[in-house]
Amino acid sequence: MTGQPVRGGAVKTFPEARSEPRLLVPALMFIALVVAAVASLGAPLITSVATSFHVSLGSAQWTLTVALLSGAVATPVLGRLGAGPHRRATILATLAVVVAGSALTVLPLPFAWLLVGRAAQGVGLGLTALMMGVARDHLPEKRSAAVIALISVVSIIGAGVGYPLAALLAELGGVRAAYGLGLVVTAAALLTAWRSMPEAPEGRSAHMDVAGAVVLTAALLLVLFLAGERNLWSRHLAVAAGLAVVAVVLLCVWAVIELRSTTPLVNVRAMRHPAVAGANLAMFVGGIGMYLLLTLITRYAQTPHGAGYGFGLTTFVAGLVLIPFSVLGFVAGKLTPRVRTRIADPLLLAGSAVVVGGGFALFAAARSDLAELFAAMGVLGFGVGGFSAAMPGVILAVTPKSETSSAMSFNYVVRSVGYSLGSAIGGLILAAGTGPGHLVPDDSAYITAALVGIGAMAITTLTSLALARRRSSETNP
C-alpha cells in the first residue's frame, strides 16, 4: 500500500520509497501512451467508418475531430482537478470514462453512439498533464525532470504507435476490431492506474472555477470547430469571421474571470510570466508547423500514382511511415534530459525547431522516393521529440509544484489548438492548389505548404532564442 506523502513541497519519505519509482514510472508512461494512441485511432479509420456506417467522409471525419475537441476542453478542467487533493480519484474516474467510451465504439450501435464513444475517449488526453504532476510530486527532482520530458514525448509519439496498428486491424477484422484495440488497452490503463497511482500531497485546494471552465469550454469549442471546418471559411467567410470574433471575445472574458477568481481554472498571472508566455507562443506556432508537416507527408504518401506524384499507399502501409517518427521521437526524448545538463531548455527548443524546419526543407527538395519520405518523417520525429521533451523544463522552472498539472494542461491546450490550425492550414493550401475538376492538388502546392511550415519554425526558433537570451540575462546579470 502506498504511504501518505508528507505535507509541504517535495515528497521525501514513503514506506516503500525505493520500490515505488520502479512501479510508478512505467505506469505513467503507459497511461500517457494509451490515451494519446486511443485518441488518434480516428485518423486511420475515417474511410472504414464511412463505409461501415454508410456516412459521408465529412461525417466520418468527426470521429477524429470530436476526440480532439473533447480532449482540448477536458484538459484544463482535469489539470485543475489534478492540482487538488483528489488527483487519484480524478485519474481513475477519467480512465473509467475512456473505457466506457471505448466500449461504445465496439458495440453494434448507430453512428451517433460511435461519436459519443470517441468524445469520451478524447477526454483521456487531459491526463497527460496529470501524469506530469504525479511525477513531479512523487519522484526525486532530477528523476522527475527526465520522466516528465519522456511523458511529453510519449504523448506525441502515441499517434505513431496507434495509427499502423489500427489500420492493420481494420483491414483484417473491420472497424469494430480496430476500436477493440482501444477497449483492451484503456482497460489495462485503468487497472494500472488503480494499482499504482498515489494520492496527491496534502494541503492542495479542492475548489473549481466553474464559470471560467464554462467560458473556456465555449471558446475552445469555437476555435477548434473553426480550425476543423475548412469549408466554412471558403464558402461562408462572413459567418466564419463572425464566429472567430466571438471566440476571441470569449477568451478575453475568460481571462478577466480568471484574474478576478481566487481559485482560477488556470493561473493567468503565472501564464503572463515571460518564460511561460514565450514557451506557450513557441508551442502554438511550433505546433502549427509540426502537425502541418505530419499531415503533408501522410497525405502525399497516400496520393494515387495517377496524380503524377505520390505512392498510392494503403492506410496500413502509410501508417508504417510514422514508425521513424515514433522511434526517433523517443530517441530524442531519451537524449534530451542528458543534453539539458549542458544546454538550456530554451536553446533546446530552438535547436529542435531548426530540426523540424530541416524536415520541411528535406520534404520540399526530395520526395520522389519512399525512402525520402521516411527520412523526412524521421527528422520530424527527432525534432518533435526534442521540442516536446524540452518544453516542460521551460515552463516548470518558474511554476510552483502545486501548479504543475494546471500549467502543463494549459500548454497542452495551446498545443492542441496549434495542431488543429496546422492541419487546417495544410488543408487550405492544398485545396487552393487543386485545379477545377481535379481531385488532388498540384505537386507545387506541397512546396508552398512546406515553405509556410519553414516560416512557422523560423518564428518558433526566434521565440525560443529570445527565451534563452532572457534566461541568460537573469542568471548572469
Image (cartoon, helix red, strand yellow):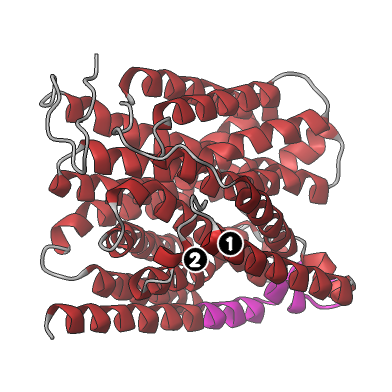
Q: Is residue 300 visible?
A: no
Magenta stretch prevailing secondary structure:
helix
Q: Residue furthest top?
A: 1
Taking depth in this image into account, of 255 and 317 the one nearest to the observer is 255
Q: Is residue 187 visible?
A: yes
Q: Earlier in the sequence, mark 2 or mark 1?
A: 2
Badge 1, how many Cα within 10 Å: few under 14, some, many 20+?
many
Q: What residue is shown at x 62% (from left), y 26% (from top)?
A: 102
What's drawn in magenta, residue-wise?
427-453
Left-right relation of 37 to 31: right
Tell me where residue 74 sits by quadrant. top right
Q: What residue is shown at x 21% (from left), y 49% (from top)?
A: 146
Callout 2 amino acid: Gly
Q: Secondary structure at mark 2?
A: helix
Q: Is residue 140 above or below residue 464?
A: above
Callout 1 amino acid: Val
Left-right relation of 32 to 225: left
Taking depth in this image into account, of 368 and 333 the one nearest to the observer is 333
Query: Residue 273, how many percent across, how many down?
Result: 37, 71
Label for residue 287? 2
Q: What residue is shown at x 46% (from left), y 51% (from top)?
A: 409
Residue with the mark numbered 1: 417
Residue 392: within the magenta? no
